[in-house]
Image (spheres, rainbow, N blue to C red):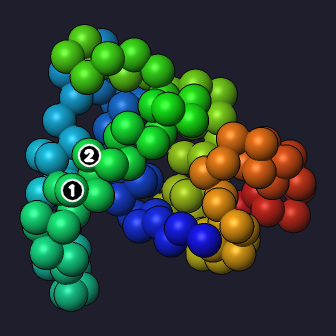
Amino acid sequence: MPTYNWDLIERLLHKVQTTAGQAFDSAGHAEELAVTQAAEGATPVPVETLKADAARYEGLLRERGFIQGEPASGYQLTANGARLLALLDSSIPDSEHPRDVLDAQEDALDPLTFVELAAKPQVAP
């Protein structure tokens, strides 16, 4: 059962949403997360680990249909990518519940599992 860094995935999806049509830099977005976490007083994951995870997540999100496009010309969120970003949205009160539900799955980013899970109203924030 894979475990995911939902904060990093949220950051990547948010950057896809806000930079559509622009080159995508997953390593740079990972560095931003490390700086943000340090500023908030959290013990950050080492930057090199975040960069490696960001590259892996970028490929996984693309492979599994959460984002589409190319890194050089930019990505766009798919419908499932937008749903995942909404579930992960840390600015929503009680945003941990959807993350807990995602963590309880065998593989929350498996496309079939995710579609089934996202359709359940009790998962939505």
Indicate the position of residue 53 as horizontal and vertical percent values: 29, 58
Which quadrant of the figure has residue 79?
top right
The residue where tag 1 is placed is 52
Label of residue 29 in the image: none
Determine the residue positioned at 77% across, 51% down.
Answer: 113
Disc 2 target residue? 55
Q: Are marks 1 and 2 in contact (CB under 8 Å)?
A: yes
Q: Distance between the residues labelled 1 and 2?
A: 5 Å
Please say if 71 is above or below 98.
Answer: above
Q: What residue type is labelled 2?
A: Ala
The picture places residue 109, in percent across and down from the top left corner, at 61, 51
**Quarter of the figure with residue 60:** top left
- Residue drawn at the location 12% of the way across and 46% of the way down: 28
Which element carries disc 2, helix, strand or loop? helix
Q: Is residue 56 left or right of residue 61?
A: left
The quarter of the image holding the N terminus is bottom right
- Residue shown at 18% from the left, 67% from the top: 49
Whether residue 114 is visible here, answered yes or no, is yes
